[in-house]
Image (cartoon, rainbow, N blue to C red):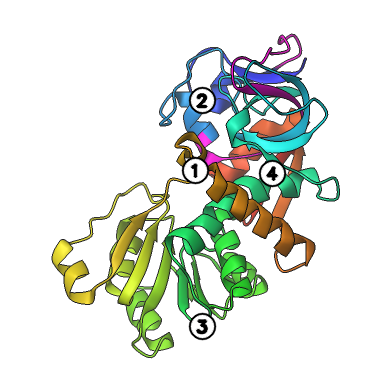
Amino acid sequence: MRAWRVDQLGHPSESLHLRDDVDIPEPGEGQVRIAVEAGNINFADILLCQGIYQERPGVPLTPGLETCGRITAVGPGVDLAIGVRIAGMSALPRGGYAEQALVKAHTAVPVPDDVDSPSATVLFSTFQTAHVGIHHRGQLQPGEWLLVHGASSGVGAAAVQLGVAAGARVIATASSEAKRQHCAELGARVVLDATSADLRDEIMAVTENHGADVAFDPVGGTVGDITRRVMAWEGRLIVIGFASGDIPSYPGNHMLVKNYSVIGLYWGAYSDRGSHDIVLAAHDDLMTKFREGRIHADVTKAYPLDEVLDALAALESRTVTGRLVVTP
């Protein structure tokens, strides 16, 4: 079969190659094999190729962390049936940048036939992270101020849409005019320049000195420092990641006097830690909102399998709004 493969770790521009002689994988214990219909393009895949991601499956490696398709084979200990359409986390090193991939069965969610594959893949991971972040962890309530950083990115755009759908007052920050326009189109009430030297004051002015009830931060760095200083009384600051490359600190005394919480979210661990019910509950709500037209998957471009390197380069340029997917 055709699949992208890394045989020697390095930047994907040098290490990742498309081959047409890769063996079709056989599912092991707790795994299923799927005929891939779509897979997410993630920055984490660039790190995987270099061997610097938190999960290090070794080589040979086919990247692609999240994928969607129909089950073509099941391994021991799996109660899913052949032919069922699912989305799930890839069982590395046999990831989703291929015609067929392995998926961890315990992470799978059902995908209805009326949901297109690119949307299903994005709703599974990107929107799941945003949903669990602002609802399960952040306990966002209607009318509250939701601050979303990196709001034109895949996960940020998902948080904006879900905040709007929840009846929150959404403040989105982004670094370019094109990205800010995208945030406005997603329904953000207020859109601010993430690079502004006066960002803290602008957020406080918009909220009439109330601050953010919930903050969704996948950026970190100096943005994280600004965020802690605009938290409302009993606010919830959800730490999603550190796209800036810098990990901020949150002084305990500041948290104490403002009575706000700093809450981490590693969505990918829920199913592994026996909390797949949280994932399924979010999935059901996302499917409902998607069918009702209250959210859309925000897929910017679907790349054919041959163009994975182009997709990764576009993602690495940090000029992309929304999500990129691959469709073998």
Q: Please report the bounds of the magenta region as a residue range.
A: 19-44
Residue at image x 31%, y 49%? Answer: 246
Mark 2, residue position: 49
At label 2, which amino acid type do we have?
A: Cys
Distance Cα–Cα, label 1 vs label 2: 29 Å
Mark 1, residue position: 275
Q: Vertical placement of 258 versus 252: above or below?
A: below
Looking at the picture, tell me which residue is in the foreground, 280 or 324. 280
In the rendering, at what x and y percent does residue 54 appear? 40, 31
Q: Earlier in the sequence, mark 3 or mark 4?
A: 4
In this view, the mark in front (4 or 2): 4
Q: Earlier in the sequence, mark 3 or mark 1?
A: 3
Q: Left or right of 167: which side holds 97? A: right
Q: Earlier in the sequence, mark 1 or mark 4?
A: 4
In this view, the mark in front (3 or 4): 3
Q: Earlier in the sequence, mark 1 or mark 2?
A: 2
Residue at image x 83%, y 29%? Answer: 83
Mark 3, residue position: 143
Residue at image x 63%, y 72%? Answer: 165
User: Quadrant of the image for the C terminus?
Assistant: top right
Distance Cα–Cα, label 1 vs label 4: 20 Å
At label 1, which amino acid type do we have?
A: Ser
Residue at image x 39%, y 82%? Answer: 202
Identity of the residue furthest to the right in this view: 114
